[in-house]
Amino acid sequence: MNKSKVKSTSKINTRMMEALEKALFLSVSENTAACYHLQSGGSRTRAKLCLDASNALMLNEKMALSLSCCVELLHNASLVHDDLQDNDAERRGRASVWSRFGKDIALCAGDLMLSKAYGALSDIDEINKLPALLRCVSDSVSKTIEGQCKDIHQQCKSLSDFELIAAEKSGPLLQLSLALPLIAANYESEVERASEAIRQFAIAYQIADDMNDWRADLANGQLNIVNLLARESDHSQAIELAKTRAQYLLKRCELELKELPANCGASAIEACQQLFKAVCRSQNE
Amino acid sequence: MNKSKVKSTSKINTRMMEALEKALFLSVSENTAACYHLQSGGSRTRAKLCLDASNALMLNEKMALSLSCCVELLHNASLVHDDLQDNDAERRGRASVWSRFGKDIALCAGDLMLSKAYGALSDIDEINKLPALLRCVSDSVSKTIEGQCKDIHQQCKSLSDFELIAAEKSGPLLQLSLALPLIAANYESEVERASEAIRQFAIAYQIADDMNDWRADLANGQLNIVNLLARESDHSQAIELAKTRAQYLLKRCELELKELPANCGASAIEACQQLFKAVCRSQNE
């Protein structure tokens, strides 16, 4: 299975993506390590989902860029700190920030991006949306950190523990890509539906990841759903079970996303369908 | 010299301080490590300066508490991450967060407090002040991180390098205690004066600290202004020079603070005067 094929086919024009890149780099321009990290690319999936949803919901460009910058900076802050915690020396095919600049500088670079994510919200015109946007970002970061702490302690003994950790660790930041545009477009009542859908996606994504990495994770003693399920059966059965679960979650996710206003979950639906196909393909490898 | 004597004689009533403590703990209640850190106390100097300034400027209680919570959470986030970077196993007479809970959890606890500092601003009633408040916090955190990165690289060869690092590292977060209430009270034009004053204070505070610790810092190879100045003279002359510089900075600081509206720098002036006395006393020890 090649997860790199799972990309949203964005309808955003080049100009918007260039504006986003410019805003991202401008916000951390004084920090060499943060710039180095952003230069390494990444798919900008979260920013694209957020820009697409913002466009669908007819938000103005300034708002769309601020929200997208916010979600992308949060995601990258979490990657820099994750690499530090996991001692991962590589990210996107080159040295991770801590491995290139040292652990102290990596800590600072992550802090800066986390802080600048909030700073990005100070630019928006519609000030009356700010409190709800701030609250949503703050709640999501808190949930992510709670998930991260649980992951550190690895209090994971069952499929439901695993799903809770996966959902808490990567769900909340991913949810922001839809939640923030919905809030800004006065659809606060739809945030829960969008977040529940993305929660399913986040779990399915982690399962797909684990189906890919179970051998390496087994060797390194890392938490992996396939190895967890294999304790009570064998690996081929465990993979089959994991696959079925991922497919179920992705179908549920797609159904929820289709209910969102102005078809603002269109890019997320595409990402869902592509991950579904990738999970199906993995059978034959 | 006993720096612990340098405290602001706050005029804040017990009820406000209790409300602040409650708000601080409530904001991180789900995170054991962050609660542990806050329980260790600390002088809450920044929160008190902020509450005093807010009262002087007639801000409502909700605003005063949100701003004070914000500055205190930022300060404590920086302490938790500083201890991690400096490998300091003790803080306020007991195990530092990383030493008690491990480095990964300490990283998360600092991230949480940094994020919650922004979250605290979502509570304020006067929404039109939010963009400027957000911008001010974001700028201050960025400057602090820049100072911290310079400190890590120790690019410090002269008194002016030292003062720049000291000012950048501890100045910006301390400045917020006055800057945020001034912004909230529509005195944005006074923020620069207040920040310049607190910048002098931050440098003087670092010099006083170094006068206290030069022997230990010499043994550990830590940056210390006394040892830096002693390279071109001897230690007794270096201490005298450092003292004169601190006294000059504190006098300048006091003069600037006296110009602030509604006497909102009163607590900061007291802190200034007490540090001045402590620096003078150090001559006879």
Image: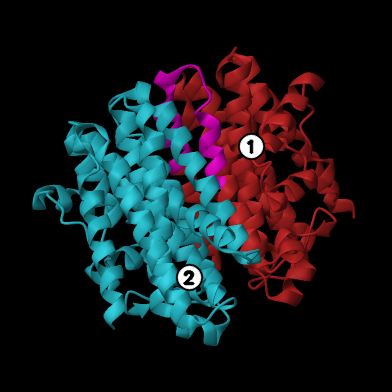
Chain colours: A red, B cyan
Q: Where in the figure is residue A97, as x and y percent of width and height?
A: 72, 58
Residue at horizontal 67 percent and vertical 48 percent from the top = A31
The chain identifier of the residue carrying mark 1 reads A
Amino acid of disc 1: Ser
B18 left or right of A97? left
Whether labels 2 and 1 share one chain: no
Query: Of B78 and B50, which appears nearest the observer?
Result: B50
Q: Residue at (51%, 58%) from the top-left corner? A: B163
Location of residue A278 (image quadrant): top right
Q: Position of residue A8 (x, y in %)?
A: 76, 32
Give left or right: position of A17 versus B276.
right
Circle 2: residue type: Asp
The disc label shown at residue A27, or none: 1
Query: Looking at the image, is A127 positioned above or below residue A201?
Result: above
Q: Are marks 2 and 1 in contact (CB under 8 Å)?
A: no
| Residue A3, x across and y down, in percent | 81, 47
Which quadrant, please, contains the N terminus of chain B?
bottom left
The magenta-colored residue range is A114-138
Q: Is residue A153 visible?
A: no
Q: Is residue B91 above or below residue B198?
A: below
Is A131 in the magenta? yes
Residue B83 numbered tag:
2
At x 73%, y 25%, the residue is A19
| Subunit bearing disc 2 | B
Mark 1: secondary structure: helix
Could one spot residue A227 in this view of the protein?
yes
Point out the image quarter for the C terminus of chain B.
Answer: bottom left
